[in-house]
Amino acid sequence: MCGLIGYVGRRADRNVQEVLLDGLSSLEYRGYDSAGMAVSNSSLAVYKREGDLSALEGALPDEPLDGVAGIGHTRWSTHGSPSDANAHPHTDCTGRVAVAHNGIIDNYRALRESLETDGHEFDSETDTEVIPHLIESALERGDDAETAFRWAIDRLEGSYAVAATYAGHETVYAARNRSPLVVGIDDDGYFLASDVPAFLEYTDAVTYLDDGHVASIRPSGVEITDERGACVDVSVETVEWEPEDAGKSGYEHYTLKEIHEQPRAIRNCLRGRPQELTGDVSIDALEDVERPDRIQFVACGTSYHASLYGARLFRERSVPATAFLASEYDADAVPVDDGTLVVGVTQSGETADTLRALRDANRAGATTLAVTNVVGSSAPRETDHAMYIRAGPEIGVAATKTFVTQQVALAMLSSGLTGERSREVVAALRDLPDRIQSVLDESRARTIASEYAAADAYFVIGRGYSAPVALEGALKMKEITYKHAEGFPAGELKHGPLALVTERTPVFAVISRDSNAETMLGNVNEVASRGAPVIAVTDASEAVAADVDHVLRIPETHRRFTPILANVQLQLVSYWMANQLDRSIDKPRNLAKSVTVE
Ligand code: M6R
């Protein structure tokens, strides 16, 4: 989705244009189809281009733009096709004010009609362009820059993170409503962004804007005011991520780097939580949460697959638990009371569908918990409790290390909230990073990927704890190889999907020694007898080898965690297949990292 960056500063060694370009390049992973920037001096210099950042860079003058304040934007089209005219920033009729915006202005048609009646001329098809024209009307009435910005923002309905800069001013104004916006604070400069990686190379000191607050960012400092204009005291937090976490560290793709970071990510996720001596799990900030009567998970995409896994863990511990696709969750249609815990699982903490579901759950009287990766994002700010998965920044659009840390976090949550004491489980959790490392070191996934990269479609099957991983394995294949792939609980095959199985549809079967090996082998034989090549992902290679074409081995672990290891093999197969097919692995077509519209 769209990315936003702003910078105000006077450092001689830090040119505004360069800071904005660096920020835009760090935001590329969110997905975009055009980019632009505006730098304020005595007049506004606005450059924007359809296409990737190189198109924008090609359009900029040889000499860097001169100025103290600027805003930049990567656009992912919603209103109007990708084009130079629809790219942000947008300006008013006089070119005095430039605005960049993430989100959707629901009432833009009515605003545009009224502005056009008043004589304003629009250059784009976007919802965003109403904002500079609203500001222009207020300036014409005699409002000062800040008052005009506030007045315009007050007219907007919808979700937005907005940044504006004016010709002849050294200020960037910003406001948000249900869309992320974070301010970065350095000794001699101030940043504004939709996402921390945009300025992480300059500063790790941040403050998060609340809905309704307005930030005025000047070379002399940042002032944050509430709806009535009164100054707000804000706390400055330190982001624990390192700038190199957001780099590729020599890997060809972020996605491969992030797959290889999984042992470290899990160690971070576990830090201080499982207690080896007693076998229990204590989760910081959740000490006062009691065992719930029932749990409802709300999540999308990969996070939904982690939730399916989490719900099963709770059910096994005798807590009724259901995972809902957040976009389908209706708090009025399911039992919700004060014994209900609604858990939003969301890497970004900004997914619009998940936030909507959590808000409904809050309204219905549930206790709410966010399981997220991003400190300060909307989900933990809007829920009663938060648990961080501590995966570090994930730049690849396809979730990899955040899925595995979501699974580990939910495994700990299920032990922690149900008071489980099991040294066996805790020891298995502790061993997971080494087990994953051995999968990474010894995987034959690359060979399998090259053997089957030309197939028509792929199926991934699993049972019990492995069924969610079958869904996730197929999602990863779709996302980064652009090949058709479907995941099924293996028992469902013969109820329909078997009709699609041919000798050109390889089937990946996750087979766990401790839980379902024999039944799974029955399902394997169903597809093998229709000619499909079968690749077993298993900790029982000797037992299954005779029934399948290939084995991708995983080490033994507690049966709850077998799917965590199996998933790593499936990630590697998808990655190497996509690599062989020369796909845009880190930024798959049509996809965005953070989906901030419903
Ligand atoms: O940030 P979230 O975890 O809420 O994102 C949810 C989905 O958009 C996300 O998991 C998506 O499915 C990923 N691209 C999967 O790789």
Image (cartoon, rainbow, N blue to C red):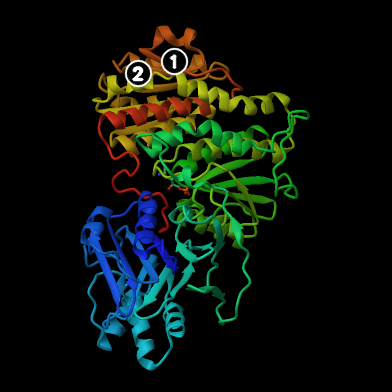
- Residue 514 numbered tag: none
The crowding category of the residue bearing disc 1, from other C-alpha atoms within 10 Å (few below 14, some 14 to 19, many at least 20), is some
Quadrant assignment, res 460: top left
* Residue for point 50% across, 40% down: 402
Task: Estimate the x, y position of residue 536 in percent, counting from the top left.
Answer: 42, 17
Q: Which part of the image, by quadrant, shows the C terminus?
A: bottom left
Q: Amino acid at mark 2?
A: Val
- Residue 527 numbered tag: 2
Q: Which residue is mark 1?
A: 522
Task: Estimate the x, y position of residue 114 in percent, counting from the top left.
Answer: 31, 84
Task: Estimate the x, y position of residue 375 in percent, counting from the top left.
Answer: 57, 53
Quadrant assignment, res 484: top left
Dot 2 falls on a residue whose secondary structure is helix
The crowding category of the residue bearing disc 2, from other C-alpha atoms within 10 Å (few below 14, some 14 to 19, many at least 20), is many
Task: Estimate the x, y position of residue 124 in percent, counting from the top left.
Answer: 24, 71
* Residue for point 44% across, 65% down: 11
Lateral position of residue 116 relative to residue 294, left or right:
left
Lateral position of residue 307 relative to residue 193, left or right:
right
465 vs 213, nearest the viewer? 213
Lateral position of residue 559 relative to residue 72, left or right:
right
